């Protein structure tokens, strides 16, 4: 089965979902497991949905080899709510929250934390227009920090952390919304990882949190119920009605990752996809200019510009006519961006490489 109107979906989020997952969801939509109901119509307290919920958690733990001393939580509100929840729960008086600034989302996370307590900037490449990730030796982390917060991948600027800081007893917290499950990592380095689902995990509306039980024990006790991580941990994320359809879709995506050979296999293909486009940029003799420095290039978001705004507009207009969607850069910086998340087929990157090469030849 194929889509009748094919597009190459390079949207930055919500982004491409695996076609096989969409087909399966379509087949199960009206009658899930011969229940006579759609999964969207079921009680989150029922046995059928609970099985879906727990399978999603088990698959995430399996695929990313998450240690037993972590909770997997499903929340709503996107990463943006996490910007507030994290300091609410873990920013202690007299112990600053440390943030590494690598782009717009880390700036927004810092802005929310400032409303709730003392903060400090442990590293930043803002003056360099966020072209790279700070090296580990550039970071300055106060020993009494409540936590260190990083954004592992930056969708707007196309940069990604290649190695993570060793923070010792200071909890390391990461926003991995745009590169979660794109490659294997050592989860035990982190006390908390959070991610909106709409790039690599499933549709928008679900936020996944991976939190170490040791950190959870240190959370501020007197918080509104729905702003406390403890509420979700104690109730298996079922204290109130969760985004059930989104979690069902997340489960299907995790099954797809497993069937593809797991995260290591997905990582190998992500490298291959990104290389197709980076090679086209590097071999264009300056016709295309990449934004990110070589050692910080993202596997998930490839950002570049052309020599003039007029040429960029022509490039984007012609790309759209040929079925390429989502190649516009973020509205705050302009330029072009190809988002190559897990579900984007390699054929889409091959097609983009061909188009970029042809466009350069016709417009040089």
Image (spheres, helix red, strand yellow):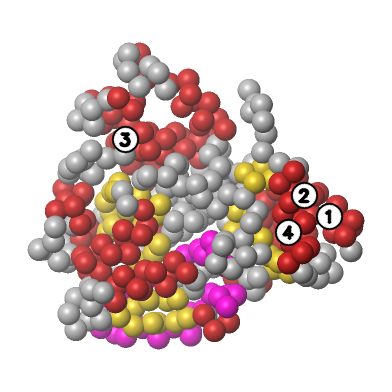
The mark closer to the camera, 3 or 2, is 2
Q: Nearer the viewer, residue 33 or 102?
A: 102
Residue bearing the label numbered 4: 313
154 magenta-colored: yes
The residue stretch that appears in magenta: 129-157
Say which element carries label 2.
Answer: helix
Which is nearer the N-term, disc 3 or disc 2? 3
Say which element carries label 4.
Answer: helix
Farthest-out residue, left: 222
Residue bearing the label numbered 2: 318
Tell me the distance, in whole angstroms, between the alpha carbons under discs 1 and 3.
Answer: 44 Å
Which image quarter: residue 242?
top left
Tell me the distance, in whole angstroms, between the alpha carbons under discs 3 and 2.
Answer: 39 Å
Asked whether, in this view, residue 303 is left or right of residue 248, the answer is right
> Which mark, by number, is residue 244?
3
Tell me the quadrant of the picture where the N terminus can be found. Answer: top right
Contact, mark 2 vs mark 1 (Cβ under 8 Å) = yes
Q: Which residue is at 40% across, 54% downward? A: 195
Which image quarter: residue 359?
bottom right
Which is nearer the N-term, disc 4 or disc 3? 3
> Which mark, by number, is residue 359?
1
Q: Is residue 246 above or below residue 339?
A: above
């Amino acid at each position: 089965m194929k889509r009748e109107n094919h597009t190459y979906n390079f949207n930055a989020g919500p982004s491409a979902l695996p076609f096989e997952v969409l087909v399966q969801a379509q087949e199960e939509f009206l009658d899930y497991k011969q229940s006579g109901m759609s999964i969207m119509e079921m009680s989150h307290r029922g046995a059928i949905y609970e099985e879906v919920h727990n399978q999603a958690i088990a698959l995430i733990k399996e695929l990313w080899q998450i240690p037993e001393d972590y909770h997997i939580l499903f929340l709503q509100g996107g990463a943006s709510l996490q910007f507030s929840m994290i300091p609410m729960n873990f920013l202690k008086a007299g112990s600053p929250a440390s943030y590494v600034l690598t782009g717009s989302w880390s700036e927004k996370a810092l802005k929310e934390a400032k409303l709730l307590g003392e903060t400090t900037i442990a590293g930043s490449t803002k003056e360099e227009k966020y072209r790279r990730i700070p090296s580990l030796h550039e970071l300055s982390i106060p020993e009494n920090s409540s936590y260190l917060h990083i954004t592992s991948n930056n969708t707007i600027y196309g940069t990604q952390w290649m190695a993570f800081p060793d923070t010792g007893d200071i909890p390391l917290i990461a926003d991995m919304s745009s590169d979660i499950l794109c490659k294997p990592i050592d989860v035990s380095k982190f006390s908390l990882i959070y991610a909106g689902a709409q790039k690599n995990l499933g549709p928008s509306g679900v936020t996944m949190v991976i939190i170490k039980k040791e950190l959870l024990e240190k959370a501020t006790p007197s918080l509104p119920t729905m702003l406390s991580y403890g509420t979700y941990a104690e109730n298996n994320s079922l204290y109130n009605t969760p985004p059930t359809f989104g979690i069902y879709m997340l489960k299907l995506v995790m099954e797809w990752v497993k069937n593809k050979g797991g995260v290591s296999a997905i990582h190998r293909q992500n490298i291959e996809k990104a290389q197709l486009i980076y090679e086209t940029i590097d071999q264009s003799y300056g016709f295309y200019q990449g934004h990110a420095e070589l050692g910080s290039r993202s596997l998930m978001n490839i950002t570049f510009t052309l020599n003039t705004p007029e040429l960029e507009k022509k490039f984007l207009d012609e790309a759209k006519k040929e079925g390429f969607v989502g190649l516009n850069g973020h509205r705050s910086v302009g330029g072009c961006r190809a988002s190559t998340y897990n579900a984007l087929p390699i054929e889409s990157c091959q097609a983009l490489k061909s188009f970029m090469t042809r466009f350069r030849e016709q417009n040089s």
